Every structure is written in structure tokens, then in C-alpha cells.
Image (cartoon, rainbow, N blue to C red):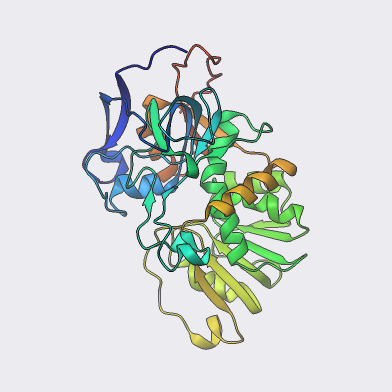
């Protein structure tokens, strides 16, 4: 294998602000080296997640200066640090949002590491995949199922995994009625999981293109974001980061139904009316990160179905454009960034640049 480059190109969060003000900066810096228990990957593809947009715009405060965003990373292991046992050079791996947990707090020892008191997250606390190279603790990386190409696999690593945990938190009964509010990278994957389980799925979203994609996937019905679905819901998931939709979704629930809020950020929630929105044992819950077991289960299920991943591809140096397009709902499904320079051991990616 060729020797690693001493420097690499990467995007960093410079000064957080509205995405149209270009808060990211394309720069050159030293390529990272793996430490004990870590692997370095040459990044082939990195998914574009709404969390990256929240970080760039300052909805999430960066925990370190000039951090590299990106936590849906697919690449090839090109260096292995000391004491690594799980991966070898040449393996194809995925790097997710969860980068590290302490392993000793009351949540980690109870199997709830998503609530760890001292976690680290890829692309927020540690550098992520909007770059040519990335380093990850091998215990937190995933093998990518052969059923998925690099571009298909990237959105599975956050949009898919977090969506899967959201579906579990929503307590959808067998053959139940699920409402999905917002229909982007995560929702279009989880709708397919629910459909495969025999659920009736109703998609409520403002985007005409997203409603068309939902119908293509085979959902039961589509409507506007504030419309009532055609039947009461057993469960609902709010993917759109819009707090005003919380009472809308709660109103759509049947008795005993559950609304799970999937995002890491949400605008303010308006006042709720207890009788209308919560009485009769309606439940409201949030979703915080995921466990590694969530990821393992989801990737296996996604491969068995297999889910169809709808992506729009951009060059890695177009990350600012991809995030702006995400902010303005200019594509359906998920967006991915593709590195156009590849190691000698892999083919050059077949790039579909989004035409504006």
C-alpha cells in the first residue's frame, strides 16, 4: 500500500453562522495518525447529516476549535495503531456518530451507553469525515455489509442508526400505525424498516419531492406537515427539527400512543394542552444518541431487507453547497460527499455531482 500523505484536505467549522454565510472553511492540515486501539481510514464517502448543519450554524456549540464535521464515514483502513485486534489494513469500515464512552458510569454499566456521562462524538468532540483521512477507536467502528455500496452505506451510520433507535423508542406495535414527520435521510430508511415489519406508515412533510419519494417507497399515505393522518397513530417519530410540530403529532396519536423526537436539536415547543395532547396515556420522549448494539442490529436488518438508500452525491470540496441544499430542502433522501482521490487499492468513485 502506498505511504500516507503527510497532509490532507479537510473542512473545518471556522465561525459558526447561517450556512449561506459559509461557516465552514476548506483547509489543509496534517493527516492524523492512529494511537493505541485506533485505526486510520482513507475516507471514500461521508454522509451529510442535519447534525452537521446544526454544528455549522451554531445550534450546537463546537466543543473544540476548527473541528472537522462528519460522522457517516465510509472508508478503507490504511493504518492500524498498536493493540488493534478487530481490523486490518484494507478492510472497509464505517465510522458513526458515537466515538467513545467511558464504560464505567452508571449508564454504561447498565447497557445504556448512549446516556454516558462522558461521551465523545465524531465530528463534534473528535474530528470527523469531511476530510481525506479520519481516525476512529476500532471498538466503535462497524464493518459495512457487502449489500451496500460506499454511497449507500454512509447514511446508514447515523441517519439509519439513530432512526432505528427512534423507532424502538416510539414503541410501534406489530402491524401498527406509524406517523413520520419530516422525510429526509433518516426517515426514508426507517419507513422501510417499519414497512418490512408490516406497519401502516403515514408520512407528513412539507416537501413535495419528499412526499413523492415516500410514495415510491410504498408508504400508506402522505400529507403536509401539519395535516392529520387518515387514521389515529399508535406511534409517531418527529424527524423535522421543528418544535411547533410536537402538538400536531401528539394530536394525531391514538390513546396510549407514543411520540419520539429523533433530533439532537429542536426549536422551541409551544404550550401543550394536557387534555388534548397528553391525557389518555399519550407519551412524549426524546432520543439521545445510540448504543453500539443499536448500530449492529440496524445494519444487519438493513442488509436483510435490504433497504434502498436514496442519495445525492457531491464532491468532498462541495460540502458547503451540500449543507446549504440540506438547509433549503433541495434534495430528497440523503446527501453524501465523495472523495475524488482514491488510494491505489480502490477504484475511483463514480461521482454524480448535483446539478443546480
**Camera-side residue of 35 and 227:** 35
The residue at 65%/35% (across/down) is 145
Q: Report if residue 332 is visible in the image.
A: no
In this rendering, would 39 be left or right of 297?
left
Q: Position of residue 35 (x, y in %)?
A: 35, 34
* Residue 238 visible in the picture: yes
Q: Height in image: 37 above or below 33? A: below
Quadrant where the C terminus lies? top left
Res 60 quadrant in image: bottom left
In the rendered image, the vertical position of residue 226 relative to residue 119, given as above or below: below
Q: Nearer the viewer, residue 124 or 326?
A: 124
Residue at the front extreme of this rendering: 83
Residue at image point 32% right, 23% down: 9
Is residue 332 found left or right of 243 in the rendered image?
right
Q: Is residue 291 left or right of residue 271?
A: right
Residue 261, position as x, y percentages in the image = 50, 64
Above or below — where is 301 with respect to 170?
Answer: above
Name the residue located 52 percent from the left edge and 21 percent from the top edge.
351
Q: Percent position (x, y) of residue 169?
A: 58, 66
Q: Position of residue 298 (x, y in %)?
A: 63, 49
| Residue nearest the observer in this picture, 178 or 44 | 44
User: For the image shown, how many numbered marks are present on the structure?
Assistant: 0
Between 129 and 276, the one nearer to me in the picture: 129
Query: At 52% across and 74% down in the image, what residue appears?
Result: 284
Q: Quadrant of residue 323?
A: top left
Amino acid at each position: 500500500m502506498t505511504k500516507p500523505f503527510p497532509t490532507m484536505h479537510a473542512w473545518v467549522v471556522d465561525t459558526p453562522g447561517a450556512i449561506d454565510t459559509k461557516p465552514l472553511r476548506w483547509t489543509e492540515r496534517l493527516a492524523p495518525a492512529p494511537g493505541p486501539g485506533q485505526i486510520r481510514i482513507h475516507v471514500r464517502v461521508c454522509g451529510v447529516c442535519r447534525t452537521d448543519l446544526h454544528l455549522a450554524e451554531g445550534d450546537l456549540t463546537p466543543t473544540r476549535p476548527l473541528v472537522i464535521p462528519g460522522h457517516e464515514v465510509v472508508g478503507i483502513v490504511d493504518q492500524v495503531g498498536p493493540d488493534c485486534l478487530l481490523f486490518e489494513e484494507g478492510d472497509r469500515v464505517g465510522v458513526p456518530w458515537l466515538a467513545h464512552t467511558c464504560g464505567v458510569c452508571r449508564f454504561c454499566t447498565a447497557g445504556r451507553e448512549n446516556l454516558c456521562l462522558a461521551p465523545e462524538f465524531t465530528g463534534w468532540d473528535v474530528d470527523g469525515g469531511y476530510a481525506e483521512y479520519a481516525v476512529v477507536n476500532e471498538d466503535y467502528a462497524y464493518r459495512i455489509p457487502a449489500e451496500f455500496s460506499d454511497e449507500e452505506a454512509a447514511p446508514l451510520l447515523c441517519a439509519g442508526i439513530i432512526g432505528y433507535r427512534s423507532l424502538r423508542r416510539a414503541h410501534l406495535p406489530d402491524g401498527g400505525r406509524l406517523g413520520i414527520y419530516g422525510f429526509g435521510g433518516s426517515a426514508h430508511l426507517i419507513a422501510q424498516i417499519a414497512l418490512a415489519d408490516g406497519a401502516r406508515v403515514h408520512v407528513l412533510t412539507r416537501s413535495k419531492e419528499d412526499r413523492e419519494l415516500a410514495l415510491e417507497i410504498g408508504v400508506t399515505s402522505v400529507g403536509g406537515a401539519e395535516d392529520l393522518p387518515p387514521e389515529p397513530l399508535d406511534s409517531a417519530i418527529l424527524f423535522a427539527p421543528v418544535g411547533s410540530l410536537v402538538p400536531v403529532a401528539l394530536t394525531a396519536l391514538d390513546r396510549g400512543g407514543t411520540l419520539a423526537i429523533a433530533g439532537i436539536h429542536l426549536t422551541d415547543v409551544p404550550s401543550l394542552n394536557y387534555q388534548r395532547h397528553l391525557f389518555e396515556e399519550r407519551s412524549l420522549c426524546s432520543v439521545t444518541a445510540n448504543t453500539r448494539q443499536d448500530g449492529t442490529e440496524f445494519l444487519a436488518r438493513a442488509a436483510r431487507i435490504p433497504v434502498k438508500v436514496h442519495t445525492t452525491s457531491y464532491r468532498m470540496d462541495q460540502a458547503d453547497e451540500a449543507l446549504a441544499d440540506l438547509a433549503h430542502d433541495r434534495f430528497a433522501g440523503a446527501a453524501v460527499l465523495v472523495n475524488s482521490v482514491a488510494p491505489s487499492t480502490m477504484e475511483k468513485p463514480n461521482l454524480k455531482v448535483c446539478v443546480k
